Image: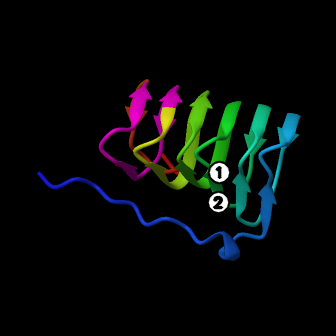
Amino acid sequence: MPDVRIKKIDENEIDTILADDIDFSGVLNFEKPLMVKGKINGEIDAHGDLYIDECAVIDAEVKANVVSARGRVNGNIVAKSKVELFSTAFVTGDIIAPEIEIESGATFNGNCIMRGNNE
């Protein structure tokens, strides 16, 4: 079986980037693509795509259209479209999504339920 290789996103295609020195606590809502390079603690409830950079640490329940993780996520993930876990990702929590891609080397500890939002 060949290794999964997920296409990396170009940062120029992302509207907002939370830099690595950001430490946010609370509820985060957004409509357009967002990249997190710092720390988030609380809840992410979004309609846009979420990109989690390699050094990012997310301690939150996550809801977004697409969740693409290269960093650490401690919390459940619900994605409307798909979840992508790069080889550097470390996820502890359950995933609910209609599609999931996991690169070799990624760590995922939790349950996975593959279904859409309308189920």
Residue where numbered disc 2 is placed: 49
Decide if residue 63 is on the left or right side of residue 68.
right
Q: Amino acid at mark 2?
A: Asp
Q: Amino acid at mark 1?
A: Ala
Under circle 2, the secondary element is loop
At 42% across and 46% down in the image, what residue appears? 115
Who is closer to the viewer here, 4 or 81?
A: 4
Residue 39 visible in the picture: yes
Residue 64: numbered disc: 1
Q: Position of residue 93 (x, y in %)?
A: 52, 25
Q: Are marks 2 and 1 in contact (CB under 8 Å)?
A: yes
Q: Is residue 31 above or below residue 72?
A: below
Decide if residue 77 is on the left or right side of residue 7.
right
Q: Position of residue 109 (x, y in %)?
A: 42, 23
Q: Earlier in the sequence, mark 2 or mark 1?
A: 2
Who is closer to the viewer here, 20 or 97?
A: 20
Q: Position of residue 52 (x, y in %)?
A: 62, 48
- Point out the stretch of residues depicted in magenta: 91-109
Q: Quadrant of residue 61?
A: top right
Badge 2 density bin: few <14, some 14–19, many ≥20, Cα 10 Å: many
At 59% across and 72% down in the image, what residue appears? 10
Badge 1 density bin: few <14, some 14–19, many ≥20, Cα 10 Å: many
Could you give the CA–CA distance between mark 2 and mark 1, rounded to whole angstroms?
A: 6 Å
Under circle 1, the secondary element is strand
